[in-house]
Every structure is written in structure tokens, then in C-alpha cells.
Image (cartoon, grey):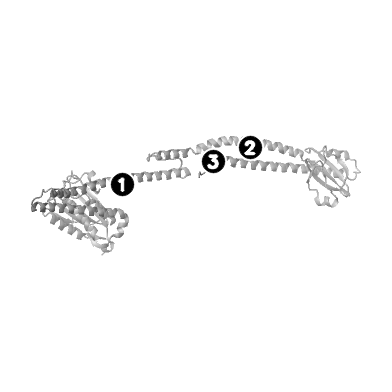
Amino acid sequence: MTRRTPRSGRLSLRGRLLALTLALLVAALLASTGLAIDQLRRTLVQQLDARVHRAALVAQRLTGPRDPAGDDRPQLQDALDPDGVRDLYAARLDADGRIESVIRPATGAPPALPRLDGPQVSERAGSPVTLGSASGGGQWRAVALPQGSGSVVTAGSLDEVDDAMHQLTGRALLIDAAVLGIMGVAGWFAVRASLRPLRRVETTAAAIAAGDLTSRVPELAAPRTELGSLSTSLNTMLDRIEAGDTARAEAEQSMRRFIADASHELRTPLAGIKGFTELYRLGGMPTTTDVDAAMGRMEREASRLVDLVEELLLLARLDERGAAAASTLHRTPMDLRTLAADALRDLTALDPTRHVTLTGPGGGDPSGAPVEGDEAKLRQVTSNLVGNVVAHTPAGTPVRIGVGTAGGRAVLELSDQGPGLTAEQAARAFDRFYRADTARGRTPRGGAGLGLSIVHSLVTIHEGHVEIDTAPGEGATVRVTLPLYIDIAGT
């Protein structure tokens, strides 16, 4: 079933804004014009009512008793011709409300007078009323005043008022149409100029959709305005998208490098084991001594495989759990001096020719370094650091083990006097499978390049930090800092 597009969706935003603006303008013009015309008509009708009322007073005197001082009827007759009244009608009614005499006839059809007897005239109290015409066309404004036993009625035609209103309405509509046309053209350019920043946003969005994640929305207006806030929000979002895309690309590249390195590390011992098995199958081991030697080599390669797989599984578990890995630690209060002493014994046992000293951080006397951590995991940290020193420094190289507190944190560091690392090599020292073989000759005990990566992961889940301080020819110092255990530190 085809879904129909709403009719409003066929117009662009510019068209919808212009249409809405013009609709509001039309409504405002019609309302204001209608209100002005209505008020003007009321004013003209009030003026007509005043003239008709004055004419009624004149007719009242004209039909009243004669003034003994003189006959003013001719002047009163002339006064029944007031200015501003297109057609005036005046008549005298008897007590029953019937026309007794016409004082001033209408030029056309007279008004259709209702029956106005004495009580009805008194009830109206000289208030103007609207009457129809005797011929059915046009309207009149009439005033009735009592006169003797009867009354007098004057009525002024509304034709002049209606004609003026018709002319004024026509002209007002023409003016409104002209204003609407001018405002429509001006509104088109105004809306177009107002939406120009949004077109720049659209251009930026199109560039990003095409793959250019470096594009940014320019500053369209002051930061506190809607457009300024929109551009700031969009740029913030684009920064996050670009950062996320960069992180994703780096993660993919790191994963490819990790898989390649892991495959290489696994392939070497497997190739050795396969080679010995094929040699045995082809009869290349005729004596028991040859078989025993091959089995010993295969055992060492298998142990190497087991160690590598265990290290990979440990890193995978740490990566998978992330921050949640900290909740799986079996934390107990402990002192890093215990680990430092064990590291000293391990280094001495692995290489009796080394001169190993135990000091404080950077030198001096060692001091307590209380922490709360998983002892087994922290022992793995020191074991990997010891293995790293043994594997990547020449035999007999002096080593210093520092333990204590510095900067409000517990510190454990291993410092050797080996060949050291360059700044670029030090920056990658904690990368997986990275080995600075050109700077530190790899010994037969060298691992797969996962030791420092494991150290970094284990220290991180303990809310600690690990860093390496090194320079070519000046040795290397790997420093681990952990939060102090406050309760023990205060005793």
C-alpha cells in the first residue's frame, strides 16, 4: 500500500513560513480594516442621528403653537434642510400613530413607519431607531417626539452612509491587497535571508553524509540565540561523532593488529610442535635420546602456548568486564612492601649476578605503602614487572626496587640500568604484543609482549596508574601508584 505524502509536506520550510506569515497578515488586515470601518460607520450613524434629532426638534416647534412675537415658521421650514443628510423625511402623527400630515416628503420612497401612538413615543424617549423603506430598499434612522396630542417623526436616509462605507471598504480592500503584495515580496526575501544559516547547516550535513567528518557548522549567531545554540549543539555532536568514528577506526586497527600478533605468537610454538611430530613420523628420531630431546622441546613449546593463552584470556576478561572488573576483586588491606620484598627475592633467584636494592620511591629508605587490593592480582603485577626486567635487560644489570608513598598515594617502582627506550617506544610500551626489540635485545626468556599490557589493566581496575620513565642509555623505571588505604595509613 502506497503511503501518501501529507499535503503540507509538499511545501518547503520557506514556503510554509511565508504562507503562515501571509495568512496571519491577511487575518490582521481584515480584522483591523473591518474594525475601522465598523467604528467609522458607527460614528457616521451617530452624526446622522444627531442631525435627525435636531430636525425632530425643529419639526416639533414647526407644528406647535404659533409664537405671538412673530411668525418664525419660514425659518423653521428652512431648518428642516440640515447639511449632511441626503434625504430627510418629516411627518406629524395623530394620537393613534397615523400620519396626519407630511411636513417634509422624502425624495424617494418614504420610510415604513410603524404605528407610533402616544405611549410608544413616550417609551422611545427620542431614541433613534432603524426603519426600513416603504419600497423595501434602503434604511432610515428615525426619531419620534411628542407634539400635542400626537407626535412628530423625522427620519434620515442611511443611503449616504452606506455609499460612503461601500466606497471606503473597496478602497481599504485595494490598499490591503497592495500591502499584502508588498509584504509578500518583502517576506519572501526576509524568510530567505533568515533561513540562509539553516542552508549552511544543510550544506554541512550533506558534507558529513558524504564522509567528511571534519566539517563544522560556522558560528551563525550569538551563542545565546536559537541559531547560535543550534550551531553549538551540532558542532558538539559532530565532535563526538568524529571522536567515536576515530575511536572505532583505531579499535578496528588495534583489533586487526592484535589478531595478527596473536596469530604470529601462536603459530611459532605450534609450528615447532608440528615439526617435531612430522620428524618423528618420518623416522627422523631413531634413538630414545632423540625422542626425549624432542619431547622436551615440545613440552616447552606447549608451556609457552599455555602461558600465552592464559594471558590472552586474562586480557579478554578484563576488556569484557571493563569498569565492572573492579567489583570482582577480592580486596583486603595489604602493604606493598611485602610485594617489593618478594620481587627482590625473585630477581635474586632468577639472576644471582644482579645487584638488587630496596629503597623508597626515587631513593632513600623504604616506607610503608598500605593499600586495599586483590593480593593475587597485585602479585601478578610485580611478577610481570620482574619478568620484564629479566627478559629485556642484560644479565647482571643492577635493579632498584622502590616502595613507599608519594603525593598521597602508594608507590611501587622497578628501576633498571638497562639500555632504555626512546620516547616513541615508551609511548607504546603498554600496547599488546609490542616489543622494543631494537632497543632491548630479546632474550630467550622474552615473552609475547603482553606483560606490561596486563600490568596496565590490573593496575587500572585497582584505580591506580602505571607509567614508564625512560631514555635511551639511561635505563627505565616502571612506576605503579595506587590509592592509599586511609585507615592503615592513619595508625
Q: Position of residue 223 (x, y in %)?
A: 45, 44
- Amino acid carrying mark 1 in the image: Ala
Q: State the residue lying farthest toward the front.
A: 282
Q: Residues within 10 Å of mark 3 (few under 14, many from 20)?
A: some
| C-beta proximity under 8 Å, tags 2 and 3 | no
Q: Nearer the viewer, residue 365 or 288?
A: 288
- Mark yes or no: residue 457 visible: yes
Q: Which mark is residue 488?
A: none
**For the residues marked 2 and 3, what is the alpha-carbon distance in whole angstroms?**
21 Å
List x then y, in percent, for residue 198: 47, 40
Image quadrant assignment for residue 211: top left
Query: Is tag 2's residue or tag 3's residue first in the polypeptide sequence?
Result: 3
Q: Is residue 362 visible?
A: no
Could you say which disc has been placed on residue 16 in the image? 3
Q: Amino acid at mark 3?
A: Arg
Q: Secondary structure at mark 1?
A: helix
Callout 2 crowding tier (Cα within 10 Å): few <14, some 14–19, many ≥20: some
SS of the residue under disc 2? helix
Q: Amino acid at mark 2?
A: Asp
194 left or right of 71?
left
Q: Residue at 87% x, 41% y: name it.
A: 103
Task: Give how far apart the Cα atoms at labels 1 and 2 are.
Answer: 66 Å
Residue 180 % position (x, y): 60, 37
Report how many numbered discs are placed on residues in the image: 3
Which comes sooner in the sequence, label 1 or label 2? Answer: 2
What label sits on residue 251 in the rendered view? 1
The residue to which callout 2 is attached is 176
Q: Is residue 241 above or below residue 185?
A: below
Q: Could you tell me how far apart the alpha carbons at marks 3 and 1 are, in whole angstroms?
A: 46 Å
Viewer-nearest of discs 1 and 2: 1
> Are the residues tagged 3 and 1 within 8 Å (C-beta)?
no
Comparing labels 2 and 3, the label whose residue is closer to the camera: 3
